[in-house]
Image (cartoon, rainbow, N blue to C red):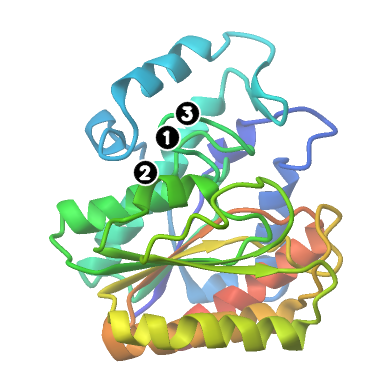
Amino acid sequence: MTTAFFSHDDFQKHNMGAEHPESPERLIAIISYLADMNLGSELDWVRPEEITRDQLLKVHPETYLRQLDMMQPTQGRVFTDPDTAMMPHTLRAARLAAGANVQAVDMVLSGQATNAFIAARPPGHHAERGKSMGFCFYNNIALAAYHALTFHGLERVAIVDFDVHQGNGTVDIVQEDERILMCSSFQHPFYPHSHVYRQPENIINSPIMAGTSASDYRKKVEADWLHKLQDFKPQLVLVSAGFDSHKLDPMANLELESADYRWLTDMLTSVAHDTANDRIVSTLEGGYHLKALAEGTGAHLEGLVAAG
């Protein structure tokens, strides 16, 4: 069995400006690192297709989808919030990113791959049911979860989000859905400053103070998540993989290194091995120091390959 790696050249056509941290260079750095480390040869490379409108409607209402369609410019850029810009290629890239998540679920649940990683942009975990924000338009991981539940008929799906910013959009969408357990670690207090203390039973928040050491981060995450995940017995583990908790990342103040991402991956693959027939789908969220992003993604992928 293999690790499927989803990528597409059109992800790089979405460009929010020369100074914007969520840049096409992020994917270039990851793919170059995989080539340098010879890791790319161990992956099953997949070119995704766009998500369908009906699949988007499982998470986002038609009014919101129409709003995005109407806002996309034919030239230049339009900002949907102070941090998030659309340009002519944006929604094509966003539909491919969402489609890659759905397609990865199909591959993993049909046994074509043991697990999968989606190197896509724009990211998704800040997109709420009817609101774009934080560089995100469609909530990729929530779309993957509801595809697994509705199309494939799974009863229990876990979402694990280790981005340095809380996945407020994912919480907004999945909260109080007893079929989904979401575990989330994030720097706090920090953007997006929401959905931290509203904690339905299916949301396990792990707020982390700025400057927390990697060893203390590991202790808290393991204590908060591991038994909850084991007791929940997910049939599929989905991961919002943000690499901006790295100590070099310019947009945050946590202290993780590449070895910590491998540790996180090994913990999640262990849960998936015990309850989900090793099935994991992971999708790229944040990470803005190019070297740290590439190395963190490489460590994550090494763990997925080892589990496959």
Would residue 213 be seen by someone viewing this image from the given angle?
Answer: yes
- Along the viewing direction, whichever of 175 and 52 lies nearer the viewer: 175
Residue situated in front as seen by the camera: 106 or 204 = 204
Residue 305 visible in the displayed image:
no
The residue positioned 65% from the left and 45% from the top of the image is 192
Circle 1 residue: 95
The image quarter containing residue 264 is bottom right
Q: What amino acid is labelled 2 in the image? A: Gly
Residue 67 drawn above or below residue 194: above
Residue occupying the point 44% across, 43% down: 139
Q: Position of residue 300 (x, y in %)?
A: 59, 75
Residue underneath mark 3: 92
Q: Are marks 1 and 2 in contact (CB under 8 Å)?
A: yes
Pointer 3: residues within 10 angstroms few (<14), some, or many (20+)? some
Instruction: Name which residue lies at 62% across and 31% down.
Output: 14
* Circle nearer the N terminus (3, 2): 3
Please state which amino acid type lies under the numbered disc 3: Arg
Pointers 1 and 3 in contact (C-beta within 8 Å): yes
Disc 2 crowd rating (10 Å Cα; few below 14, some 14-19, many 20+) is many
* Number of residue marks: 3
Q: Which mark is residue 99?
A: 2
Residue 121: mark: none
Q: Position of residue 237 (x, y in %)?
A: 37, 71
Q: State the image coordinates of residue 34 (x, y, percent, origin top left).
A: 65, 68
